[in-house]
Image (cartoon, rainbow, N blue to C red):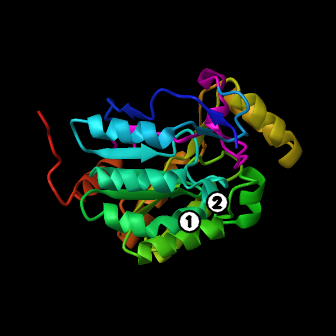
């Protein structure tokens, strides 16, 4: 596969207002093959050409080990924000797997966001890392229906495959969660469907679920999204244009109802859903005090 030259793999996170609690960001690949019609990473502001082509970052593991050695503070490394760490090439390349070995070796924790069922391959490494640091695994699942998932995420594993992966991971003792985001107005924002996702997550043993009823659109991904809507969901584009015009945040018109019923269902199942509570629990997973080297 093609590679891209980079100078660093880790970036330090300064903001504390994210719904993923982490100290560092890591992306080992560039681009994604899931083909999600709504993906924000297609936005022009990111300047990513050929986004649908996955490229591995050259010498990523060598760079990562050098950076891990130099860090004065152990913490949580998040991956999956701009490229799925478990893309189809990872099955053979094993770059993410080898990175996890380094994260374990140097005493860091990890937070992974993915749409791929391949993540259950690395259960052994998650067990090892969790002996000293947090392991936070979250699968993005936007609809309980495989047929609908194949339309909005055409090349990603079906929703049922992701739930199966969550069940395997949870059964192994891993700390798991679900991102129900984005929630696409007029397409995936039926309250009963959101609640079905919560119920399925509960059956799989997840500890937390985050739901944000709406999506974002900006230059680049808006044009792509509208083009696909015309072919896959005829008539929906016009609803978006009349409702949202050129807004960045496109919230579902039933967002208040979704939020209220979602919270009730999570509480019934004992599932965390508030960012602060989720992040607090993840931080509590540290088995040893974070090292501060002076």
Position of the N terminus, as image quadrant, is top right
Residue 48 occupies which quadrant of the picture? top right
Identify which residue, 119 or 57, lies in the foreground.
Answer: 57
Q: What's the residue at 62%, 35% (across, down)? A: 40
Please say whether residue 242 is visible from this viewpoint: no
Q: Which mark is residue 197?
A: 1
Would residue 263 appear left or right of 69 to someone viewing this image? right
Would residue 137 appear left or right of 251 to someone viewing this image? left
Any magenta on residue 256? no
Start-end of magenta stretch: 19-47
Residue 194: x and y, percent? 57, 60
Cα–Cα span, label 1 and label 2: 7 Å
Q: Secondary structure at mark 1?
A: helix
Identify which residue, 74 or 153, lies in the foreground.
Answer: 74
Would residue 58 appear left or right of 62 to someone viewing this image? right
Q: What's the residue at 49%, 57% (across, down)? A: 97
Residue 220: x and y, percent? 71, 26
Q: What's the residue at 72%, 39% (across, down)? A: 53
Identify which residue, 4 or 219, lies in the foreground.
Answer: 4
Could you tell which of marks 1 and 2 lies nearer the N-terminus?
Answer: 2
Q: Write down the residue under mark 2.
A: 143
Question: Do the residues bearing badges 1 and 2 touch, measured as CB atoms within 8 Å?
Answer: yes
Mark 2 nearby-residue class (10 Å; few <14, some 14–19, many ≥20): many
Any magenta on residue 28? yes
Magenta stretch mostly in which secondary structure? loop
Residue 3: x and y, percent? 64, 36
Would residue 44 appear left or right of 104 to someone viewing this image? right
Position of the C terminus, as image quadrant, is top left
Identify which residue, 132 or 117, lies in the foreground.
Answer: 132
Q: What's the residue at 32%, 46% (across, down)? A: 76
């Amino acid at each position: 596969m093609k590679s891209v030259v980079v100078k660093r793999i880790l970036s330090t996170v300064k903001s504390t207002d994210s719904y993923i609690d982490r100290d560092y960001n890591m992306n080992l690949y560039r681009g994604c093959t899931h083909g999600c019609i709504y993906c924000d990473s297609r936005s022009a502001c990111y300047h990513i050409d050929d986004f649908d082509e996955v490229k591995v970052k050259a010498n990523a593991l060598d760079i990562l080990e050098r950076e891990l050695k130099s860090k004065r503070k152990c913490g949580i490394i998040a991956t999956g924000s701009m490229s799925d760490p478990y893309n189809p090439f990872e099955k053979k390349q094993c770059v993410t797997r080898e990175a996890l070995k380094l994260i374990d070796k140097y005493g860091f924790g990890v937070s992974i966001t993915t749409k791929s069922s391949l993540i259950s391959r690395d259960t052994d490494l998650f067990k090892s890392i969790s002996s000293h640091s947090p392991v936070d695994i979250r699968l993005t699942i936007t609809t309980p229906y495989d047929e609908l998932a194949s339309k909005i995420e055409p090349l990603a594993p079906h929703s049922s495959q992701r739930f199966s992966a969550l069940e395997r991971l949870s059964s192994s003792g891993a700390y798991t969660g679900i991102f129900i985001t984005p929630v696409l107005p007029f397409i995936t924002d039926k309250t009963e469907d959101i609640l079905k996702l919560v119920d399925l997550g509960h059956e799989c043993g997840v500890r937390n679920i985050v739901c944000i009823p709406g999506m974002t659109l900006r230059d680049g991904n808006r044009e792509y999204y509208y083009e696909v809507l015309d072919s896959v969901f005829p008539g929906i584009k016009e609803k978006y244009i009349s409702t949202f015009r050129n807004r960045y945040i496109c919230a579902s018109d039933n967002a208040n109802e979704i939020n209220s019923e979602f919270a009730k269902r999570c509480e019934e199942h004992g599932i965390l859903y508030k960012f602060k509570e989720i992040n607090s629990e993840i931080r509590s997973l540290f088995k040893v005090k974070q090292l501060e080297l002076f």
